[in-house]
């Protein structure tokens, strides 16, 4: 049964658009941090470490996917990602519940902003290729500055 679920999840992720994938990553990162907090409170450092490491992997992926030059906020977002990665690592090393909560407090508004951006894009009529030859150039950077 786990193989079927894993395949379903892999197929689901492979078929979503970039905006939905980004929001899914943020949602999973929030879940990872929430689970880490629960594990730390229960005294389960190995469990917390596992969840925090997964959150770190997500941030690392966001870092390598971000094209800082694609928009004005790119360098600032990169700084936030780097800070968050450092904080998640320190949280795991120290087993600090409050630091984990602080990480969640940093992730949550970013997640909300990306969800709002994705909703906005869902309501925008994107012209077809013949109507907008410049669209090809715009999409090569990646949606929302994420390559």
Image: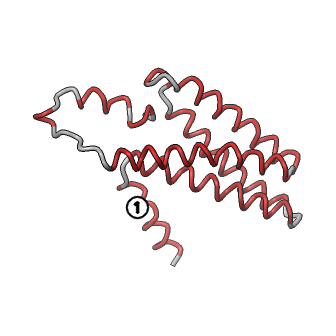
* Front residue (pair 57, 96): 96
Q: Residue at x 71, y 32 (%)?
A: 83
Left or right: 111 with respect to 141? right
Q: Position of residue 33 (x, y in %)?
A: 71, 54
Identify the residue at the far left of this view: 130
Q: Write the residue at 48% across / 47% down.
A: 22
**Nearer to the camera, 124 or 24:** 124
* Circle 1: element type: helix
Place residue 34 in its image quadrant. bottom right
The percent coordinates of residue 145 (x first, y second) are 44, 31
Residue 3: image location, x then y, percent:
49, 71
Q: Is residue 103 left or right of residue 96?
A: left
Disc 1 target residue: 12
Q: From this view, report whether residue 27 is shown above or below residue 8.
A: above
Neighbour tally class for label 1: few under 14, some 14-19, many 20 plus, Cα within 10 Å? few
Q: Quadrant of residue 137?
A: top left
């Amino acid at each position: 049964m786990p193989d079927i679920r894993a395949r379903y999840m892999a197929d689901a992720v492979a078929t979503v658009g970039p905006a939905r994938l980004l929001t899914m990553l943020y949602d999973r990162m929030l879940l990872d941090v929430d689970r880490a907090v629960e594990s730390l409170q229960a005294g389960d450092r190995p469990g917390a470490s596992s969840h925090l490491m997964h959150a770190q992997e997500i941030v690392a992926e966001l870092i390598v996917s971000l094209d800082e030059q694609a928009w004005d906020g790119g360098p600032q977002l990169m700084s936030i990602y780097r800070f968050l990665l450092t904080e998640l690592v320190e949280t795991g090393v120290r087993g600090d519940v409050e630091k984990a909560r602080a990480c969640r407090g940093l992730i949550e508004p970013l997640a909300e902003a990306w969800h709002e951006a994705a909703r906005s894009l869902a309501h925008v009529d994107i012209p077809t290729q013949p109507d907008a030859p410049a669209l090809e150039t715009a999409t090569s950077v990646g949606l929302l500055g994420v390559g």
